[in-house]
Amino acid sequence: MRILVTGSDGYLGSLVAPRLSAEGHDVVGLDTGYYRHGWLCPDHMTTADGSPNPHLPQVINGDIRRIGVDALRVFDAIVHMAELSNDPLGDLIGAVTYDINHLGSVSLARLAKLAGVPRFVYMSSCSVYGVAEGTVDERSPLNPLTAYAKCKAMVERDLTSMADDNFSPTFLRNATAFGASPRMRFDIVLNNLCGLAWIEHTIAMTSDGTPWRPLVHGLDIAQAISCALRAPRESVHRLVVNVGSDDNNRTVRDIAETVADEFPGCDLSFGPPGPDQRSYRVGFDRIHTVFPDFSTKWDIAAGAAQLHRVFESIELDPETFYGRGHTRLKQIQYLLKTNQVDDRLFWRHP
Ligand SMILES: NC(=O)c1ccc[n+]([C@@H]2O[C@H](COP(=O)([O-])OP(=O)(O)OC[C@H]3O[C@@H](n4cnc5c(N)ncnc54)[C@H](O)[C@@H]3O)[C@@H](O)[C@H]2O)c1
């Protein structure tokens, strides 16, 4: 299959694109490169014998809002991951979040349909469920609370209405990711706690840690994407599916304790019940029905151990952990402050 992976230079994209390439797909990336400044695991660039990794894709350096229909005609599928990827960015620049995440994504899908690309795998998020009682699944009402989550819900709605005999969108509602990636993010919960345990030897939670969070390793997300692309088209046509596992529905307290166990000497403390009582558990039955081969390979203890090994091997320092290279909000603030991007986040000097 000839596949375009947008956001191929991001935290998940830099895991997904090489995996699809290694599976024999012809993969091309598309990314505007907001976070190219951060690169954590240089060994990803080379194979064991030191030669260049043959699975790194060719990347088109561009913005999803400016791609033309002709560039898309050659593809059999698009895996769309290029968006502003968290709530703090949505809070900082809500209008741009709508511009890229909603309008940009819908426009890309329209062009893909026009270009005759039959499959479109969209990276949605469990955040569309917002605050919910008990366990939510794909049939539960949506309750998106932030600009980021609202855009995900709107893209799902708009692409669903575009589905027809020639265009099959699939919506992967991913849990919060964790684990090592060359384009590491330290602004997601497990990665952040591991970094704190390594750098500060202290995790001081400001709340009691009782809320539940669903987590999933980035490589298991890559596996789900691969399953969606391999599945018969009719079985993924307009399909919504949660990506994660029941085992990785964890309380924040449990996540912090798992991290503290992995990093001996880490001092862990909790506070009183916090004001943010967002808590939800996600049901993951459907993914096993639609993708019988899918099974998550990583639990949070294995993810924490993986990060521990990476931190040791690269001697992770405070500058890298706290710097803008691996925290999305800090890097976008820096690009705006230094006028490298305009207020719609287009590069001034492409
Ligand atoms: N990481 C998670 O926990 C998680 C969970 C659920 C869903 N998702 C979704 O998965 C996708 C990837 O997440 P991630 O963690 O890899 O994010 P990321 O921020 O690391 O990567 C996003 C990539 O998209 C690129 N990009 C952003 N806007 C662009 C534009 N207008 N044109 C071209 N490229 C653009 C960025 O340069 C970046 O390389 C996102 O859509 C995110 O919302 C992520």
Image (cartoon, helix red, strand yellow):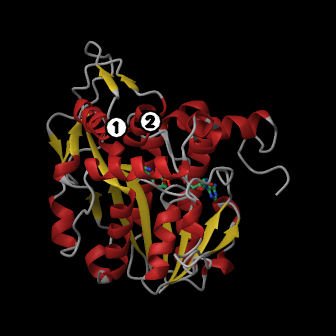
Where disc 2 sits, the SS reads: helix
For image coordinates 64% across by 39% down, the residue present is: 324
Ligand 1 within 8 Å, label 2 CB: no
* Residue 295 left/right relative to 65: left
The correct choice, above or below, for 92 with respect to 167 in the image is: above
Q: Residue furthest top?
A: 272
Front one among 27 and 234 = 27
Q: Does the Cβ of the disc 1 residue fall within 8 Å of ligand 1?
A: no
User: Is 45 displayed left or right of 293 in the figure?
Assistant: right
**Cα distance in 3D space between marks 2 and 1:** 7 Å
Above or below — where is 57 with respect to 278? below
Determine which residue is flagged by label 1: 263
Q: Are marks 2 and 1 in contact (CB under 8 Å)?
A: yes
Q: Position of residue 165 (x, y in %)?
A: 38, 82
Q: Amino acid at mark 1?
A: Phe
Q: Measuring from the top left, give residue 21's x and y in whole percent.
A: 49, 80
Q: Amino acid under label 2?
A: Trp
Could one spot residue 265 in this view of the protein? yes
Ranked by sequence position, the earlier of labels 2 and 1 is 2
Nearer-the-camera pick, 269 or 201 = 201
Q: Which residue is mark 2?
A: 198
Question: Most extreme residue toward the right, as rendered?
Answer: 349
The label on residue 6 is none
Residue 215 rendering spot, x and y as whole percentages:
30, 47
Quadrant occupied by the C terminus: bottom right
Quadrant of the rendered image containing residue 292: bottom left
The vertical placement of 188 against 40, above or below, is above
Q: Nearer the viewer, residue 347 or 240?
A: 347
Where residue 233 sits, quadrant-wise, is: bottom left
